[in-house]
Each structure stands twice: as C-alpha cells, then as structure tokens.
Image (cartoon, rainbow, N blue to C red):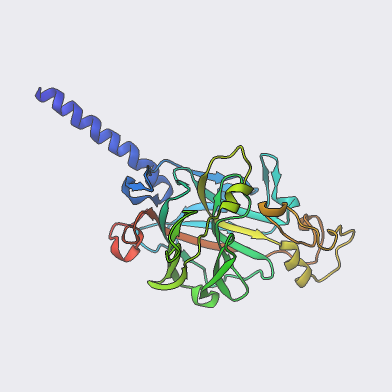
Amino acid sequence: NTQKNCQKKEMKTLLALLLLIPSLSWGLTFSGGKEVGGNTVVPSNTFQIELTKDPKVAFIYTAEIARAGNKSQKFTLSHNSCGAEDGYDDCVNDAQRTERMPESIHHDVGDVVYYGLSIFLPKDFISIHPAVVTLGQVKLEGLHKPIWITKLRENYFTIVTSWNKTECRLIKINEMIGNWTDLIIKADYSIKGPENNNYFEVWVNDKRKCLNKKQILTQKALDSKYKDKKNKINLRYGIYQIKLSEWFNKNKTKEPRGLEVYDEGELRGGSEHGEMKTITGSPFNYDWGIKLPTQVIYFDEMRVGSTKEEVDITLNKEPAD
C-alpha cells in the first residue's frame, strides 16, 4: 500500500509539472486553472497567428525589461512585415500584424471575464497616425467586427466596444512611453441581463477609466456571424496595424507610380463583418519615398480570471512568467 501511495503521489506531481510547463513557456496564466464562466481554463499553448513574414523575429521572450519576474513578451513590427494564411492576406488588405491567440482562452456567450495585463512603450516609440494600431481585441468566432478592441490613436490609447458603438479614452500615449501601464478589463458577454449592470469596466494603473452599462455583445452580433461558427469568444493581442496607406499618403516624399485606389466610399469586409475605407489595399507594392517606422511593444503579467482580484498585479506576488 505504501508503494502504491508513493506511485500515486509521483504521478500527481508529474501531472502538475506537465500542466505547468506550457504556461511557463509562453508567459500567460489563467486564474491558476480556476473556472471562468463555467469553463475550466487550463494553460495549454498560444497560437502564433502566422500573418507576418518572420514570426520568430516579430515575437520573442526577452529579459530586456519586465513588469515583474525576469522576462516579458516583445512584439516587433517593421516595414513590409505583412503575410498571409488560410486564404486571407494582410498584404492586400492594407494591414500587417504580429499577434498571439491563447488557445485555452475560449469564452462562451454569457461569461463574465476579467483580463489583467501590463504594456510598455519604449522611449523611441513612434506613432503611425492616421494608421490605426491595435494592441488587443476580443472576437466572436465567425465575426470580423470585434466585441472590444484597444487602439493607439493620435494622442490617446482608447478602447472601443463595437456593437454598442462606444469609445473610451484610457491614457495619453505620451504618458505610456517609457512606463509600464497596468490594465484591468472586465467584460460581461451576456446578451440579456439587467439594465443597470456594469457590462464593461476598465481600470488603468488602478484607476477606473471606463464604465459601460450597455451590453457589449448583442443579439445583432450573434445573428450577423457566419452560421457554421459556434458562439465562442477568443482573445488575441500584439501589434495589428491597419489603414497603413493613409500613413504613407500623409508622409510620402514622392508620388507612388501606378497607384490603384479603391473607389470612393467602397467598403471592404462586408456589412457587419467589418467595414473599412482605405486608399489602397497593397501599400507595400508602391514607392512612397519613405518606409514605415518599426514599432516595438512589450506585454507582461497577463492574467485571465473570474474576479478583479485574480488579475490585479498589485495583489499577485508571484509573477505571471
């Protein structure tokens, strides 16, 4: 019996280590495996979205800087880093990106979820306004328009809830440069509920900046998604740059030869699946006399939980990485 008990203990220890190793390998923790909205969140892996030319350069773990612990996640996006996969091509859609999507974060409609993360913009960070830079977004599978999305605008870091059409300014970009910015985001993905409910809240450096009492996920969104997709919600984060042709057009030092532009007012992406007016879908095919500046952004201390306390960096002594 003693020998059997020892063997059982060894198996439990081995299983715990096997579950822990993937979370250490990509620096993202999920409430220690606790339940979120009735679904057990188990650290497994992160899918590197292969829509960049060189993902090994575009994303690395680095000891250059960290919010806590020894390492952070470094995303780098330089001129003409766009790529394609599975029938979709950023290079003809006026975009480029380096993003990661945690495979184990797939929420259901109706879940209430808290996200915690820290973002660092280095001192040499350069804005590419009027192009739009997205650092994180949550989507319903089969629907292009995100439920919520964070954006670096001209002067502000903002968050947009697309389906109830609200936008909230979080912090000035110049206040983020050279500093860690701590975020906590509460998202209630219920499509039905009480009128006076806090469906969406955002805290920046421990101060609440946004409170949205309107539902962020609507029946219209569910009805608009592709019918073959389930009601699953996923998170992706990193650097996603869109409307790059607008930046090139504003900063060009020469007129691009043979530029093919979209007809005025043309929408790409289709109705509720995402609308975007743009100058050209293939900006890297032309010589504008200037190159897009390289952007580097660091992410650290990423947590997902069912309460604010679970994801608050000030209440978690153990680093996420």
Residue 54: in sight, yes or no?
no
Which of the 4 quarters of the picture holds residue 18? top left
* Camera-nearest residue between 138 and 256: 138
- 105 relative to 159 in the view: left or right: left
Number of on-image labels? 0
Residue 135: in sight, yes or no?
yes
- 140 relative to 30 in the view: left or right: right
Q: Is residue 321 above or below residue 290?
A: above
Q: Residue 272 location in percent, x, y?
A: 67, 53
Extreme residue in the right direction = 258
Q: Residue 28 location in percent, x, y?
A: 41, 51
Q: Is residue 4 above or below residue 117?
A: above
Q: Residue 100 location in percent, x, y?
A: 53, 49
Image quadrant containing the N terminus: top left
Which of the 4 quarters of the picture holds residue 262? bottom right
Q: Residue at x 41, y 72 (%)?
A: 208
Q: Residue at x 41, y 51 (%)?
A: 27
Extreme residue in the front direction = 194
Q: Residue at x 44, y 69 (%)?
A: 180
Which of the 4 quarters of the picture holds residue 41? top left
Extreme residue in the left direction = 2
* Camera-nearest residue between 305 and 4: 305
* Camera-nearest residue between 204 and 188: 188
Q: Residue 230 location in percent, x, y?
A: 54, 40
